[in-house]
Image (spheres, rainbow, N blue to C red):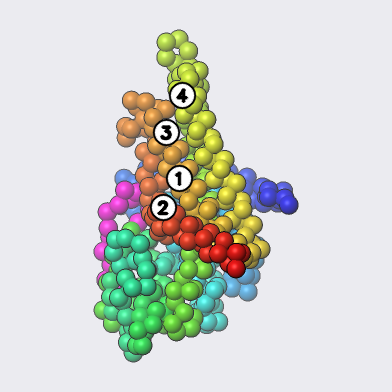
Amino acid sequence: MNLDFSDDQKLLRDHVRRFLSEKCPPSAVRAILEGPESYDKEVYRGLAELGVLGAAIPEEYGGSGLTHLELCVVAEELGRVMAPVPVSSSIYLAAEFLLAAGSKAQKETWLPKLANGEAIGTFAMSEGQGRTSPEKIHAKVEGGKLTGTKSPVADGDVADFVIVSARDEGGKLSLYLVNLKADGVRRETLESIDPTRGQARLTFDRAPAELLGTKGDGWHIASQVLDRAAILMAFEQLGGADRALEMARDYALERMAFGRPIGSFQAIKHMLADMYVSATLARSNCYYGAWALVSGAAELPVAAATARVSATTAFQHCAKNNIQVHGGMGFTWAFDCHLFYRRSNALALSLGSLSTWESQLIERMSAGNAGAAA
């Protein structure tokens, strides 16, 4: 089994990396962090022009008609530069929900706009702290009107539409598509550790809502899409972990102390070695997840949780140790280490916390073992 990307996919990676190195240097990330804009519109428009936003969207809906493997390649490159763009919300989630459960009319309306960057979508499930479960969802839809509050919602401050989990008239959990520019929608921007990835509280007061998929099938659909998005998010985290490791390595080779590079000291060597091991383990699990994602393998739920756990751990580990390798300067605003630390912690809470995915991994592996034993 070949678990490496093809030559064409590597060419795509190189092309996207060149574009991002030119259009999304650390200064561009800082401009969003310190400025009034919620995301980098120029970078997002450029990604759309390259066709990578629509990589996994069929050509009939305005996409590039490639596969999720190409999207994994793009995700890793976005993670390397901490791109301040709403790709995860719009492409990993909203587009996937439409592909999984959207009607033909919903797909024709929104997928081309997502692919060309004309519209931004997102997903809203959480209604507070803690692990989200069906019992914690109280938003409801009656007569095609949605009432309730969702918080936090990634990129909810800039999205044009949102897929919402809510209860229907019969109390069953279903999914609904809501145009955020319609009446009955109020947005409130939330502060977070990483302002380059916006968060919002969305309040709905009888906002018009279209059913997405089958009534009562909301939790099942959401679980499937979140697994798919988890693998794509893991590749983004993997890119960030690799870049943080590279930064630490380069600094360790350049910084001198007591007449020698600090990378020659055993403590720094061990720290860098640990970072390399965690990033390499994450890459192995991400590749396994990518295979399961593209092949539709039965192992997808376990592969998704495994990739998510290992990539989250690796990115947080590498981002934290990158600061330590940089020493007294590492935590200052002038150095870029804190940008990776911010993003690693923000992504660790996206799609559910690390502990949530660890619990899911244990539950899924236990269920698989029980089934095998039976």
Query: Residue at image x 41%, y 46%?
Result: 344
The disc placed on residue 321 is 3
Is residue 321 at least partly visible in the picture? yes
Q: What amino acid is labelled 3 in the image?
A: Asn
Of pointers 4 and 1, the one earlier in the residue sequence: 4
Q: Which residue is mark 4?
A: 268
Gap in Å between the C-alphas at discs 4 and 1?
A: 20 Å
Occupied quadrant, residue 159: bottom left
Looking at the rendered structure, the secondary structure element under dot 2 is helix
Q: What amino acid is labelled 2 in the image?
A: Leu
Q: Examine the structure image and report whether residue 319 is included in the region drawn in magenta.
A: no
Q: Answer left or right for 244 relative to 297.
A: left
Q: Nearer the viewer, mark 1 or mark 3?
A: 1
- In the image, which residues are magenta? 185-198
Looking at the rendered structure, the secondary structure element under dot 3 is helix
Of pointers 4 and 2, the one earlier in the residue sequence: 4
